[in-house]
Image: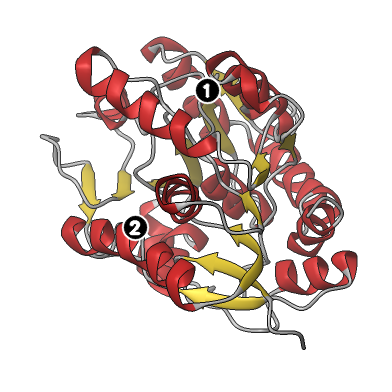
Amino acid sequence: MADNRNFFLVDMPIDKEWPLLKGLEASSGQKWTIAYREGRLRIPFYRRLWNFIFFPLRIRLFKKASKIIAWQQFYGVMFLFYDRLFGHKKMEVSIMTFIYKERLGLIGKLYKAFIGYSLKSSNLKNIIVFSQSEKEFYLKCFPFLKGKIHSFPLCIAPIETGLVYDKHLLEEEYIFTAGASNRDYDFLVSVLDQTEYKLKIAWGGDIAHGANIEILHNVYGEEMYKYLYNCKMVVIPLQDLNISSGQLMLLQAMQLGKPIIVTNNCTIYDYIEDGKTGLILANEKKLWIEAIKKIYNDSDFYDMLSKNEIYSFKHDFSLKSLGEKVGSIV
């Protein structure tokens, strides 16, 4: 291999058999080196911030890179920021899982200026988002990105661990949800608090709730899959309707055939066919309660959603296919 190398920057441990990496290498015809630093919510904020700032800097200073793909968007943004700050090195940078949320006030203006400054680096080649509407939204925010933003549906590998039936959990027939990005758990609790339905939320935060709701702290990986596998259905309440979020939870539920209710977010139609592979609803209490009752009480409707979701996941959302699409543009 030449001195220059291709680096894939990630915030989670993966191995060389990762289907996305296999698809990427097959499609691009190039080898990619995985570079990993933890950047997810399971670690304290100060450690994530440290990694966001210094991990890309270390790669820039001490590695010869011809191409960079950043699975964790801030690794890519910071890499481009240093590129503009310290002077260009000849390379191509692609950012995946890009999310930008507009913020109010001075902080919002400074944040947008920082993101814009970084993305204007001449080394930025691609930004990959997971819905067409999201692409259109970001082009309104940053018109200079025209021609560099690509929309591919998010894909994930099949869950292979943690899928163990738990008799006690099954008997609870609970509703399950997980995740932190752009979630509206205030709304969800207002819908289900003090009702007959049990709700379990795998989340690092907290909120006042009744006895029928349980917050599961520090539940990740196989432990999270156990709760997902044994639930009755999955709900994904979203807050901002213009940003991409919730797809990972959605696809995990879909592959297990768990009926899904998700907020009517403009990015979600790339994943769900309303009424066939899930239910897409506005955040209105009455609509959510009626939909939950139908899923619980109509077994034919439940089975139809479940079978359609499993079929859709197998045919439309393979992780290897995402790698092949990314490999075709890097």
Q: Is residue 324 above or below residue 191?
A: below
Q: Amino acid at mark 1?
A: Ala
Kindly indicate the quadrant of the structure image that contains residue 210: top left
Name the residue: 23% across, 52% down. 204
The quarter of the rendered structure image containing the C terminus is bottom right
Q: Amino acid at mark 2?
A: Phe
**What residue is disc 2 on?**
52
* Eye-nearest disc, 1 or 2: 2
* Residue 166 in view in this figure: no
Q: Is residue 219 above or below residue 64?
A: above
Name the residue: 22% across, 49% down. 214
Name the residue: 33% across, 36% down. 197
Q: Position of residue 3 (x, y in %)?
A: 69, 84
Q: Is residue 17 above or below residue 78?
A: below
Query: Which SS class for mark 2?
Result: helix
The quarter of the rendered structure image containing the N terminus is bottom right
Question: Does residue 149 appear left or right of residue 38 in this picture?
Answer: right
Pick the front one: 143 or 103: 143
Query: Which SS class for mark 1?
Result: helix
Characterize the local packing of mark 2: few (<14), some (14-19) or many (20 or more) Cα atoms within 10 angstroms.
Answer: many
Pick the front one: 195 or 162: 162
Mark 1 and mark 2 lie on one chain; the one further toward the N terminus is 2
Question: Does residue 4 appear left or right of residue 260 in this picture?
Answer: right
Label disc, if present, on residue 291 of the rendered structure: 1
Q: Position of residue 193 (x, y in %)?
A: 22, 29
Characterize the local packing of mark 1: few (<14), some (14-19) or many (20 or more) Cα atoms within 10 angstroms.
Answer: some
Asked which colour scheme the image uses, the reply is: secondary structure
Structural distance between the alpha carbons of marks 1 and 2: 40 Å
Kindly indicate the quadrant of the structure image that contains residue 2: bottom right
Question: Does residue 28 appear left or right of residue 52 in this picture?
Answer: right
Q: Position of residue 25 (x, y in %)?
A: 81, 72
